[in-house]
Amino acid sequence: MNTTNSIATGAYPSSASGHNNHISALKFITCGSVDDGKSTLIGRLLVDSKAVLQDHLAGVQRQGETDLALLTDGLSAEREQGITIDVAYRYFATEERKFIIGDAPGHEQYTRNMVTAASSADAAVVLVDA
């Protein structure tokens, strides 16, 4: 199977289903402490909503396994350190709604970045490691 040209339905706003074009996108962020799974949750949402290119998914391998948290890491320092530093926004859509999700950092020294993202969000998902 040629995965280079495979684009998942909904990978970009223009390919979203016509059913939700009249609804504005819900903008939300993930919040939580370090290593609570914020980036991994976003990666899972992106994969499950088919908003990830197959070749991009193949590129987020770490030690032979797919690391969904890497789907939102835009800075090379984030990939090298395995942390979120700056807020990364990703788009995905379902048949019912469009979403813009912000992956906010959990480290204390990057709290300012999280607060900036929260100030423009409609909602927040707070993750707590149980």
Image (cartoon, helix red, strand yellow):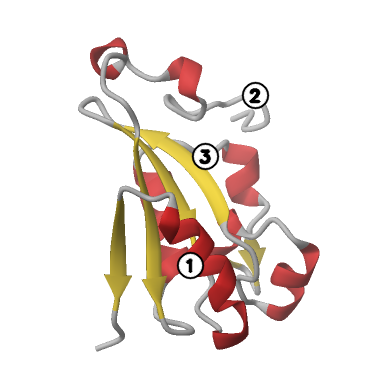
What is the distance, in whole Å, between disc 1 and disc 2 at their CAs?
38 Å
- Tell whether label 2 touches label 1 (CB within 8 Å): no
Is residue 91 in view? yes
Residue drawn at x 34%, y 32% is 25
Who is closer to the viewer here, 48 or 21?
Answer: 21
Q: Which disc number belongs to residue 8?
A: none
Amino acid type shown at disc 3: Val
What is the distance, in whole Å, between disc 3 and disc 2 at their CAs?
12 Å
Furthest toward the top, the residue is 18
Who is closer to the viewer here, 118 or 88?
Answer: 118
Quadrant containing the C terminus is bottom left
- Residue receiving disc 2: 5
Report the mark closest to the observer, 1 or 3.
Answer: 1
Who is closer to the viewer here, 69 or 122?
Answer: 122
- Residue receiving disc 1: 115
Q: Earlier in the sequence, mark 1 or mark 2?
A: 2
What is the distance, in whole Å, between disc 1 and disc 3 at their CAs?
27 Å
| Residue 20 in picture, x, y percent from top left | 26, 19
SS at circle 3: loop
| Residue 97 in picture, x, y percent from top left | 26, 30
Report the mark closest to the observer, 1 or 2.
Answer: 1
